[in-house]
Amino acid sequence: VLTSPDSPKAKFWGHMAETATGDDGLIYRRPLLRDENSATTSIGTLVEEGEAWSTFPSGQANDTSINGCGAEYVPTDNELRAIYAHQGSSALHDAIGWPVSRFYISNTVADTFTQTFTYDVVSLKTGDETQMPSSGGALLSCRTTPVAVASQIIVEANDTAQFVKVDDTLSALKVKKGEDAVIRVVTKNAQGNSVPNVPFILRREGSKNRQNAEMINKSITVINAAGASARMNSSSSLLYGVTGADGTTSFTVKQDDSMGLVTNMYAQLYQLTIESNKLPVMFTVITSPDTPLASYWGHMPETFTTRSGIAFKRPLLTAEHPAGQSTMANNESWLSLNTAAKNDVSKSDCGEPYQPLLSEFQELYSEHPNGAIGTDLGLPLTNTWWAYDKIAYANVWYDQSINLSNGSSSRALSNTVAFVSCLVNPHAVAASIEMTSTA
């Protein structure tokens, strides 16, 4: 009979062909009888026309230890539809005798993103296609010729201009907090050629600051090419993706609450132990300077200039000039000085000609009012800022400082502690003083 193969394991004498041809010209092997499969686990049984056929979990169709096809021989959903079309569609069972009361497994997976993959399975009775979880059982036909399979996976910056050398030990996909970092996943075979439609798992490591300390519970948001969004809260978070027809796919990565952190992103070929490279994705903050001594990765400008041309240097971190006191602001420790130390160049790192006047600070404030200086320039605002010029009160000269949050100034007390900023260019210094009489 046509519905039984010519095999000593068959129940009936038959003449089912060992292979069938698809509309694509490819040749496919008939499914295995249950008694032809020596595997004792994972394999199910389908009885049709008196014969018992092997059914496989869809996620194990490539497992040769249970007589699966092997990764390079599992057909795609389109190839299964080609078998259906070539054999006269609904007449396939009558034409070649294959069992058709159960779906056939393909290697095509649905891009579920946040949940483990489901496999596309095709009915050779109706041509219909549906999805089946990896544990679901279905019939299996194998290609007779192999296709290229992915043996390497790469995670890289989608925009090569964003991948920069940060220092001698680190290159990273570097963007500012609030910007998008777009990563690309590429799947290739052993010869370096792109392999399409490859399932993989997207993974992350913990987010770390510039001093390589891991920050707990710092999530990132990942958006796939279809626009679906998901959060990856920790290194145990998994997302699922499939490369496209060109062997690539992309994801947008965001960390809008970043403190100035870097997170390694990587991918793993599904059902394999092959992992990609680790791609550091860095989100810098304006509240940290770009120095190895900073606690966090930052992009605070080294200098900033008013419209009239007054150029200021950024303040120093305590670690850059440990000569005074330290004040924590925006997760960094900043040099701050009391009244006595303010005029000591060895402590302020700022000679008198380079110390800003109150009017110069006021001009800077007027261009970034009401706390905007913190968001525009990243300057710490938990203390006031020393001005060079003094203020007279009750016949006594006092140092003064300015609050860059609200623009107010005040005379200093003996215990006042304030931040220090230096000018890029010094004030002119009087070479002499001359007294004349008008009598």
Image: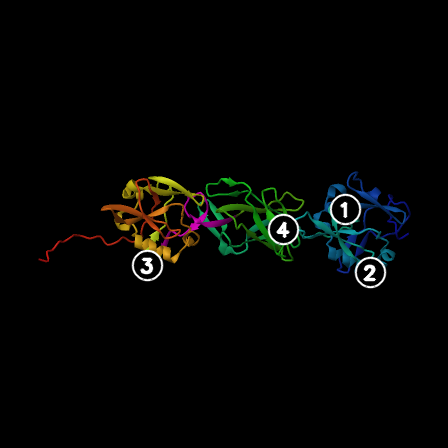
Q: Position of residue 342 (x, y in %)?
A: 30, 43
Question: Which dot, 1 or 3, sits closer to the camera?
Answer: 3
Q: Quadrant of residue 338?
A: top left
Q: Amino acid at mark 2?
A: Ser
The magenta segment: 281-304
- Residue linked to disc 3: 309
Q: Position of residue 354 (x, y in %)?
A: 28, 50
Mark earlier in primary sequence (4, 3): 4
Q: Secondary structure at mark 1?
A: loop
Q: Quadrant of residue 322?
A: top left
Mark earlier in primary sequence (1, 4): 1
- Residue linked to disc 1: 136
Residues under labels 1 and 3: Cα distance? 71 Å
Please say whether residue 164 is one of the residues in the magenta stretch. Answer: no
Q: Secondary structure at mark 2?
A: helix
- Residue linked to disc 4: 189
The answer to whether 193 appears left or right of 287 in the picture is right
Pointer 4: residues within 10 angstroms few (<14), some, or many (20+)? some
Residues under labels 4 and 3: Cα distance? 58 Å
- Residue linked to disc 2: 89
